[in-house]
Amino acid sequence: VELKRISNAEYLAIAAAEHLLRRIDLSRAEEAEQLYTLLSNTTNTGALSSLLKKEATLAWLCSQRSWENAFDLVATDEQNPSLVPYRKLFEAVEAELAEDLGRAGTLYLRLARANPYFEQGVIEAARFMQEQALDSPTAYDLLIRALQYNPYAIRLLKAHALQAMRMNL
């Protein structure tokens, strides 16, 4: 990744975070992994770049379903209101991992309906509905609803297309 030429740590962290989020959207895992490594090694960053760094790192960890690392990252910053959607997602994931599927389903649905702009939450809710609850129409409806609010979200569009194919639509 050509970002290594940026000498200012603040600018490097911002650029790496933005590029990482884009690579996640495009499902370019190898490039995203390199950016994640680069971002992890940035130090001495300011408030804005620290926030972007944390958001991109969380997006990467969630996309890789590295839940334990993501839980730990959120636990280190309990006062940050921008992490509330992740806390709600992790509550649903924890219920799913504990095989409390009824509670997990309720939490996933609540998360997806309350915040259609939180792409990771909507996608995980749709995945849960498809895989665990065996409820394809609900998974599809969650994605359609989120796309009404966020019609240009690449990851939502991809998840919607895949769900439509699963349902033979």
Image (spheres, rainbow, N blue to C red):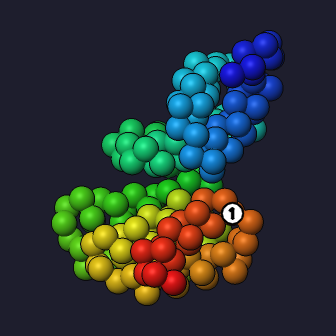
Outermost residue on the front side: it is: 168
- Give how far across and how far down residue 9 sits, in percent: 74, 19
Give x and y (percent) for residue 50.
67, 34
**In the image, what residue type sits under mark 1?**
Ala
| x then y, percent, for residue 145 | 61, 82
Q: Is residue 38 visible?
A: yes
Q: Which residue is mark 1?
A: 153
Count all numbered tags in the image, as a single digit: 1
In depth, the one of 55 and 16 nearer the eye is 16
Identify whether 43 is placed above or below 56.
above
Residue at x 39% of width, y 39% of height: 69
Is the residue marked by circle 1 packed among few (<14), some (14-19), or many (20+) residues within 10 Å? some
Of residues 30 and 9, the one nearer the viewer is 30
- Residue sitting at 53 percent across and 59 percent down? 120
Q: Residue at x 34, y 43 (%)?
A: 68
Examine the image and state in which quarter residue 95 appears. bottom left
| Rendered position, 62 above or below 89 | above
Question: Image quadrant for the N terminus?
Answer: top right
